[in-house]
């Protein structure tokens, strides 16, 4: 069965000020909610120990709320304000071949990221240690943590990140300054917004690959599949490392 024709992409009539509003609202609200979650769970109290389940619940709440806030900001300042459709931000049908290619991109990114992180470790003069491992599993290995974080990182996080960074930011830049600088700037923004300095080189590679995939296929759905598969593989690798079976990329 053939897919219906893709909706014709429209030039995004979004001024830079609205892009900035999406960023400010998203990051600002997430930081405030993060502080509220920390206070609610008592994480700021010195000398208090927390169970892995408490930390897991707090982490999941933050990720889900962050996704909801980003989507709400995009809807308010981009979709409704400028009369756009979600299809204009990349939520368009894609040929089935692109989903297989998206999975291939995700798998290819694993050794690429490992190589970049190894190079970072060599520059720093010590073995590279992924700091995200303590964010996703501060309480150590658990099956519940593995399952929940794989689902959240693989299915929830890519939705808002792809709409904001590829469907909106990259597409906006691509229309105005061209492909190469748009890929570079959006990839660096993607890496920087994760807030982990050591991971910026590797995540810039990931962001660049996802931007190029979006440019080629014209739909965010395969890009979300690639992003989600990459995240899921990385989460599984980190939990495997905690279980003592391997070394995290």
Image (tube, rainbow, N blue to C red):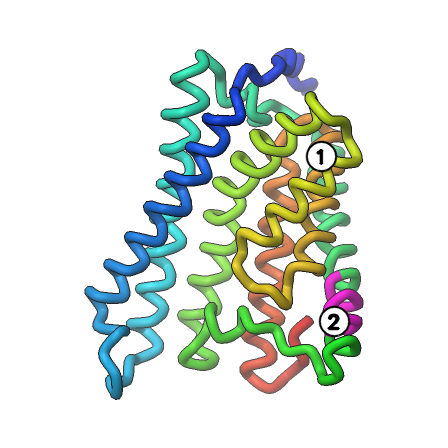
Closer-to-camera residue (231/116): 116
| Quarter of the image with the C terminus in it | bottom right
Residue 108 among magenta residues: no
Q: Secondary structure at mark 1?
A: helix
In the rendered image, residue 115 lying in the magenta stretch gets the answer yes
The residue at 62%/14% (across/down) is 11
Task: Identify the residue under disc 2.
Answer: 120
Q: Residue at x 45, y 55 (%)?
A: 152
Q: Earlier in the sequence, mark 1 or mark 2?
A: 2
Q: How many labels were placed on the picture?
A: 2
Which secondary structure class fits the magenta region best? helix
Horizontally, is 11 left or right of 139 in the view? right
Separation (CA) of disc 1 from disc 2: 24 Å
Side (left or right) of 114 relative to 33: right
Q: Residues within 10 Å of mark 1 (few under 14, many from 20)?
A: many
Residue drawn at (58%, 50%), measured in percent from left and top?
228
Which of the pair 78/215 is nearer the observer?
78
| Crowd tier of the residue under label 2, counting other residues whose Cα lies within 10 Å: few below 14, some 14–19, many 20 or above | many
Quadrant position of the N terminus in the picture: top right
The quadrant holding residue 138 is bottom left
Residue 133 drawn above or below residue 97: below
User: Residue 174 at x, y = what percent?
Assistant: 70, 27
Asked whether 218 or 142 is in front, the reply is 218
Residue 110, above or below 135: above
Q: Position of residue 48 (x, y in %)?
A: 24, 84
Instruction: Say left or right for 47 vs 107.
Output: left
Tell which of 125 and 152 is nearer to you. Answer: 125
Q: Is residue 207 left or right of residue 61?
A: right
Q: Which residue is mark 1?
A: 182
Residue for point 22% across, 66% down: 39
Q: Please state the extent of the stretch shown in magenta in the rendering.
A: 113-120
Image location of residue 67, percent across then percent down: 41, 44
């Amino acid at each position: 069965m053939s897919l219906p024709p893709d909706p014709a992409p429209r030039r995004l009539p979004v001024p830079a000020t609205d892009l900035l509003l999406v960023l400010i609202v998203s990051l600002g609200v997430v930081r405030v909610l993060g502080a509220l979650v920390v206070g609610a769970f008592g994480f700021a109290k010195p000398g208090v120990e927390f169970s892995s389940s408490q930390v897991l619940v707090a982490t999941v709440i933050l990720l889900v709320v962050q996704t909801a806030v980003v989507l709400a900001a995009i809807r308010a300042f981009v979709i409704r304000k400028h009369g756009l459709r979600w299809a204009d931000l990349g939520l368009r049908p894609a040929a089935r071949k692109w989903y297989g290619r998206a999975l291939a991109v995700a798998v290819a990114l694993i050794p690429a990221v490992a190589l970049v992180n190894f190079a970072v470790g060599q520059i720093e003069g010590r073995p590279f240690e992924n700091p995200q491992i303590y964010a996703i599993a501060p309480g150590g290995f658990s099956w519940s943590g593995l399952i929940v974080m794989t689902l959240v990182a693989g299915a929830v996080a890519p939705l808002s990140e792809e709409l904001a960074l590829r469907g909106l930011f990259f597409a906006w830049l691509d229309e105005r300054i061209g492909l190469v600088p748009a890929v570079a700037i959006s990839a660096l923004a993607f890496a920087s917004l994760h807030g982990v300095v050591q991971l910026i080189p590797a995540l810039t590679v990931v962001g660049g690959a996802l931007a190029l995939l979006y440019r080629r296929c014209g739909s965010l759905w395969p890009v979300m599949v690639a992003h989600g598969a990459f995240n899921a593989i990385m989460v599984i690798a980190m939990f495997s490392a905690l279980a003592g079976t391997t070394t995290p990329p």
